[in-house]
Image (cartoon, rainbow, N blue to C red):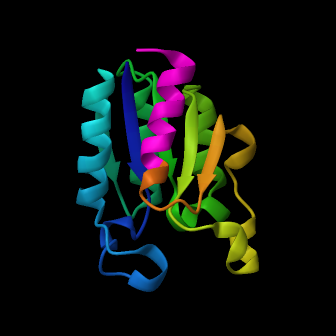
Amino acid sequence: MKVLVINGPNLNMLGKREVGIYGESTLADIEVMVGEKASALGVDVLFYQSNHEGEIIERKQSAGTEDIDAMIINPGGYTHSSVAIRDAILAVGIPFVEVHITNVASRESFRKNSMFSDIALGTISGLGPMGYVLALEALVDRYGR
């Protein structure tokens, strides 16, 4: 099984950005944690992060030609605004879990709306970096190795 993890804007600033909200873990820390779990599960995992909507769209589109079985997506701020990323996900038809480090439902009102939750296999929100590991476990459980 091959899983692509896509992180959107500002997630490259984890560990430096609003530590009281997002915690001290860096994106590299999360990638190590997910990579270790993937290795234990016998799954290949690829990581991608971009601050640019078009680049995220292109990466999702290319996933359709790379034998990617599933995705874990943290769209960052694009969660609430990107119809274009949503359309790219629908175009490739790869199942995915939406992940958010914080509990977006307990934050500002504009964060309560997701462009992705209704098309995701599931959404994990508010469990910090562990949400990525739980998403990987759910995908492996659902789609096998």
**Image quarter of residue 67:** top left
Question: Magenta part of the protein: which range?
Answer: 132-145
Q: Residue at coordinates 64% horizontally, 47% vertically from top-left? A: 123
Query: In this picture, is 110 found above or below 12?
Result: below
- Number of numbered markers: 0
Q: Is residue 47 left or right of residue 11?
A: left
**Image quarter of residue 64:** top left
Q: Position of residue 112 (x, y in %)?
A: 74, 67
Tell me the quarter of the image containing the N terminus.
top left
Q: Could you tell me if residue 58 is visible in this image?
A: no
**Image quarter of residue 60:** top left
Q: Is residue 54 left or right of residue 97?
A: left
Of residues 12 and 137, the one drawn nearer to the viewer in this rendering: 137
Q: Could you tell me if residue 99 is visible in this image?
A: yes
Q: Position of residue 121 (x, y in %)?
A: 65, 34
Q: Position of residue 96 (x, y in %)?
A: 56, 35
Q: Residue at coordinates 60% horizontally, 30% vertically from top-left? A: 91
Q: Position of residue 24 (x, y in %)?
A: 32, 74
Q: Is residue 61 magenta?
A: no
Query: In this picture, is 88 found above or below 99?
Result: above
Q: Residue at coordinates 44% horizontally, 74% vertically from top-left? A: 22
Magenta stretch, main secondary structure class? helix
Of residues 88 and 36, the one drawn nearer to the viewer in this rendering: 36
Q: Residue at coordinates 49% horizontally, 42% vertically from top-left? A: 134
Tell me the quarter of the image containing the C terminus.
top left
Query: In this picture, is 140 found above or below 32?
Result: above
Of residues 135 and 68, the one drawn nearer to the viewer in this rendering: 135
Q: Is residue 116 left or right of residue 36?
A: right
